Amino acid sequence: MHDDDQSDVRQIDHVRALSALANPDRARLMDALAVHGPSTTTALAQSIGLATGSVSHHLKVLVEAGLVAPAPGGSTDRRERRWKLVTRGMRWTVGQFRDQPTAQAAATSAEGAMLERQFERAREFLEIREEPWDDSAFSSHVWLQLTPDELLELGQQLNDLLLGWRRRQIPDDGHDRRTVLAFAHAFPAEP
């Protein structure tokens, strides 16, 4: 999949969107749409192992939160309607909601759910360690001395690097390419 839209990362600033993202099943639906593109409710249910009724409910919440929309050219039949992400990337910080306790709690919950999902994916890979991917997969652990502004700059540089890889034109060269989850977290901590 290739992204031509350079503005495909959206700043999340609504409690409704953050609350929707805090639900693990909704996060999985968002991941499935990001990886596979527009999909029907039935296809999404099959891909993540949920009942079609549950997927319909979660899609309704995601639509109301402005995160998912009907895909153009889809069927008018509710069972065959295709859904798409409004934007493929999102960003927010807990600090941006400092003066809004409800929103700050929602942002913290959404970030916690995302971290848990990333940890689950990493743990699953460690359990299967499939060749030749186990030679390429990596983990990085680096302690840095940064100011808040430097940390912000580092985050933007990492984001730009990852988005550059996602947006590149994928060659049709017959090589085995798979979906890869790349994530990074950087925050003040002590050893």
Image (spheres, rainbow, N blue to C red):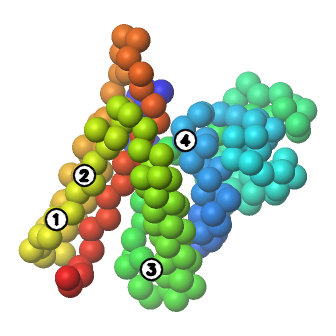
How packed is label 3: few (under 14 Cα within 10 Å), some, or many (20 or more)?
some
In the picture of the structure, the residue carrying the numbered disc 3 is 97
From the viewer's perspective, is residue 155 above or below residue 9? below
How far apart are the alpha carbons under marks 3 and 2? Answer: 23 Å
Q: Is residue 17 visible?
A: no
Q: Is residue 148 visible?
A: yes
Of helix, strand and loop, which one carries label 2? helix
Mark nearest the camera among 3 and 2 is: 2
Quadrant of the rendered image containing residue 73: top right
In the picture of the structure, the residue carrying the numbered disc 2 is 158
Question: Do the residues under discs 2 and 1 have CB atoms within 8 angstroms?
Answer: no
Mark nearest the camera among 3 and 4 is: 4
How packed is label 2: few (under 14 Cα within 10 Å), some, or many (20 or more)?
few
Question: Do the residues under discs 3 and 2 have CB atoms within 8 angstroms?
Answer: no
Mark nearest the camera among 4 and 1 is: 1
136 on left or right of 85: left
Residue at 82% from the left image edge and 56% from the top image edge: 54
How packed is label 1: few (under 14 Cα within 10 Å), some, or many (20 or more)?
few
In the picture of the structure, the residue carrying the numbered disc 1 is 142
How packed is label 4: few (under 14 Cα within 10 Å), some, or many (20 or more)?
some
Amino acid on which the number 3 mark rests in the picture: Phe
Residue at 39% from the left image edge and 71% from the top image edge: 93
In the picture of the structure, the residue carrying the numbered disc 4 is 34
How far apart are the alpha carbons under marks 1 and 3? Answer: 28 Å
How far apart are the alpha carbons under marks 2 and 1? Answer: 14 Å
Amino acid on which the number 1 mark rests in the picture: Val
Q: How far across and down, in percent of the image, does residue 135 sit? A: 28, 38
Of helix, strand and loop, which one carries label 3? helix
Amino acid on which the number 4 mark rests in the picture: Ala
Residue at 46% from the left image edge and 58% from the top image edge: 123
Q: How far across and down, in percent of the image, does residue 171 sit? A: 36, 15
